[in-house]
Amino acid sequence: MEFTTIKGFKDILPEDVGTWQRLESEARRIFHSFGFKEIRPPLLERTELFSRGIGQETDIVSKEMYTLKDSKGRGLTLRPEATASVARAYIQNRLYQKNSIQKLFTIGPMFRHERPQKGRFRQFHQIDAEIFGVGFPLACDFLKELGYSNFGKPDVHIMKIFKSIGLADKNAGHYQMLKAITRIADHTGESAYAVDKLFWLIGSGYFYNHKHIGRNGRVGSMRAAFIEHVIRS
């Protein structure tokens, strides 16, 4: 019987290893220059970590995960992505107690049972970066310095609010809107995360449907208390 690699998996041969090492070394150099630290979470995690973090209804969870059960019947899964594992490590090890802002990156293999095709394998390698303790606007600063422009957009409702009350120019783009949130944080003395969270809630519609606010956009007398609660929580 001839043994071969499993479908969707491949060997990285000696003549290719140098290219991989150069790519990983350059990624580490760039991340370190921006104050990121490397973290290496395990390849195997409890299945619930991904089913809760990614969502039960997603294709990744429902169709693509490599899952097994241990001797006690507990579900274990080869990680299909890195974010959930890094977030779990951040919380479990209380990294927020060492520094309120944590910038972490990891490099390694991920596993998804999807249809193999050219350039796409069931074991693939990912370079992942996570920022904890700052709002979306500050995270976007890092991405913009790396040359990325398509890093997410603020809610359309938030953009209308900012433009209507003069917090941003009527022709402001998405990046300028995100910077406006940071300016508000600096002016009020609140964290960018708190301001970012508040305006996300407003844009999501949750603000107007909250029991203390009133429905259908009728802002009630508890508005100030609600904002205070959001900022402090």
Image (cartoon, rainbow, N blue to C red):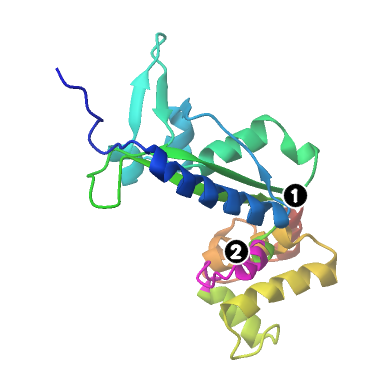
Amino acid type at image mark 2: Trp
Tell me, for residue 19, which label it has, or none. Answer: none
Which residue does the image show at 80% across and 38% down from the upper left?
A: 98
How far across and down, in percent of the image, does residue 224 sit?
Answer: 75, 64
Residue placed under numbered mark 1 in the picture: 101
Taking the magenta stretch, the answer to whether it contains residue 143 is yes
As drawn, the label of residue 200 is 2
- Closest to the camera, between mark 2 and mark 1, is 1
Residue 55 seen in the current view: no
Considering only vertical position in the picture, is 151 above or below 131? below
Residue 171 found in image quarter: bottom right
Instruction: Farthest residue to the bottom: give it.
Output: 170
- Note whether 125 is above or below 156 in the view shown: above
Magenta stretch bounds: 139-155
21, 33: nearer the viewer:
21
All told, the count of numbered labels is 2
Of the residues shown, which amino acid type is indicated by label 1?
A: Ile
